[in-house]
Image (cartoon, rainbow, N blue to C red):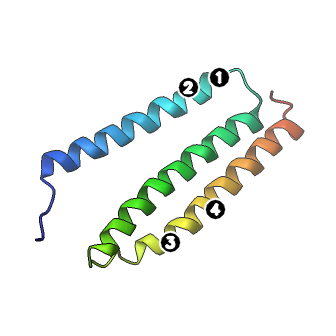
Amino acid sequence: MNQKPTNAFIAASWGALCIGISVYTIGLWNASMLSNEKGYYFVVLMYGLFAAISLQKNRTRSAGRYSGYGYLLRPQLVFYVASASIISSWLMECFFNLK
């Protein structure tokens, strides 16, 4: 049984993901926290997204379908985004005295 999701479901899924990430990011931008706290919550968002993708890919793999090469690059992407977030928050606090 090889059923593909409909285009409407795919569009609704991408729309919900984009709206959720946008609202979360806007909330972090407007929050009155230190930059390193904002970076922490952004990294939590990235790890949550990675966990959701990992769960879905694991289900795909257990169903006997190939997950693809792009899945192997996602942990590196999450690591680089998290590192950039932490470094940028540290630089803002040290050099620009933003809190």
Q: Inspect the image, locate mark 3, and give the three-letter code of the amino acid beneath it.
A: Leu
Please report contact status of discs 2 and 4: CB closer than 8 Å, yes or no. no
Q: Inspect the image, locate mark 4, and give the three-letter code of the amino acid beneath it.
A: Phe
Q: Earlier in the sequence, mark 1 or mark 4?
A: 1
The quadrant in which residue 95 appears is top right
Secondary element type, mark 4: helix
Secondary element type, mark 1: loop
Judging by the rendered image, the residue that carries numbered circle 1 is 31
Image mark for residue 27: 2
Please report contact status of discs 1 and 4: CB closer than 8 Å, yes or no. no
Judging by the rendered image, the residue that carries numbered circle 3 is 73
Marks 1/3: CA–CA distance: 31 Å
Image mark for residue 79: 4
Please report contact status of discs 1 and 2: CB closer than 8 Å, yes or no. yes
Q: Inspect the image, locate mark 2, and give the three-letter code of the amino acid beneath it.
A: Gly
Q: Residue 97 in the image: x percent, y percent? A: 86, 31
Marks 1/2: CA–CA distance: 6 Å
Q: Earlier in the sequence, mark 4 or mark 3?
A: 3
Marks 2/4: CA–CA distance: 23 Å
